[in-house]
């Protein structure tokens, strides 16, 4: 896995994938490594403190556009429509494409969150399990594959938990090496 020049390519990273794929974990880790703000599309899609209640679309879209206008960020989410809105500003794309069983297991391991009910939790598990079978849906394998295929800048498709961890580890090493190189040049 070879990375492009971190100071340029990693300015605006978009991480997409199914629910439970590990997008938030990877975005948080990379945001910390790069010292970039992390943007969670869930926070823009849902009303604050009201699990399962979607925010007004016009307001949500404006919030996403405003976040995308920043110079640097790591943005993550399942929302293909929102990913499509920021793709032209994205400098590197990461698609975490894990099997649905792994995504469901990750969600079960983290348990009920943010005020969701058992019924909502069960619906989320069903929704995650249908990732590859959903058609004509922005939040699907089909849409993520299309967005990934048309993206012409650096991109990575990570298809196992090991690949996700390896990506984060190698990026950290690449960033450290680039910083060491810059420090050596400026001496």
Image: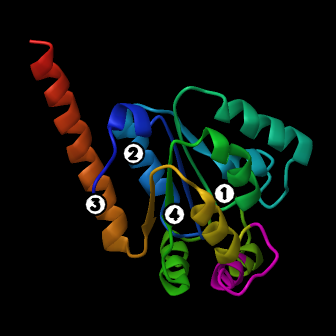
Proximity of marks 2 and 1: CB atoms separated by less than 8 Å: no
Which range of residues does the magenta coloring cover? 124-138
The foreground one among 128 and 133 is 133
Q: Residue at x 64, y 76 (%)?
A: 141
- In primary-sequence order, the first of circles 2 and 4 is 2
Give the number of the disc on residue 77: none
Q: CA separation, marks 2 and 1?
A: 24 Å
Is there any visible trace of residue 138 in the rendered image?
Answer: yes
**Which residue is at 45% across, 51% downward?**
154
Report the mark closest to the observer, 3 or 1.
3
Q: Position of residue 31 (x, y in %)?
A: 43, 40
Q: Does residue 39 appear left or right of residue 117 in this picture?
A: left
Q: Residue at x 68, y 76 (%)?
A: 142
In the orientation shown, which residue stands out farthest toward the top? Answer: 187
Residue 1 numbered tag: 3
- Location of the N terminus by quadrant is bottom left
Q: CA distance from mark 3 to mark 2?
A: 16 Å
Q: Secondary structure at mark 2?
A: helix
Residue mark closest to the camera, 4 vs 1: 4
Q: Nearer the viewer, mark 3 or mark 2?
A: 3
Which is more N-terminal, label 1 or label 2? 2
Does 46 sit above or below residue 124?
above
Residue 13 drawn at (x, y percent): 50, 44
Q: CA distance from mark 3 to mark 1?
A: 36 Å
Asked whether 134 falls inside the magenta stretch, the response is yes
| Disc 4 target residue | 95
User: Residue 113's image quarter?
Assistant: bottom right
- Tell me, yes or no, whether the highlighted magenta stretch contains residue 93: no
Query: Is residue 88 found left or right of 158 in the rendered image?
Result: right
Q: Quadrant of residue 20?
A: bottom right
Return the x and y of residue 178 as percentages of the image width and height: 22, 33
Residue 32: which quarter of the image? top left
């Amino acid at each position: 896995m070879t990375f492009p020049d971190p100071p340029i390519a990693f300015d605006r990273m978009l991480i997409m994938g199914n629910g439970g794929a590990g997008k938030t974990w990877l975005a948080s880790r990379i945001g910390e490594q790069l010292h970039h703000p992390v943007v969670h599309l869930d926070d823009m899609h849902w009303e604050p403190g009201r699990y399962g209640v979607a925010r007004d679309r016009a307001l949500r879209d404006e919030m996403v556009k405003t976040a995308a206008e920043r110079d640097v960020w790591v943005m993550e989410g399942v929302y293909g429509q929102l990913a499509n809105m920021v793709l032209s500003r994205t400098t590197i794309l990461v698609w975490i494409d894990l099997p649905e069983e792994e995504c469901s297991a990750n969600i079960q391991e983290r348990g009920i969150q943010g005020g969701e009910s058992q019924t909502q939790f069960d619906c989320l598990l069903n929704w995650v399990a249908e990732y590859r079978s959903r058609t004509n849906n922005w939040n699907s394998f089909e849409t993520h594959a299309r967005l990934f295929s048309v993206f012409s800048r650096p991109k990575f498709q990570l298809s196992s938990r090991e690949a996700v961890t390896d990506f984060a580890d190698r990026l950290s090493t690449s960033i450290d090496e680039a910083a060491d190189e810059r420090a050596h040049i400026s001496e």
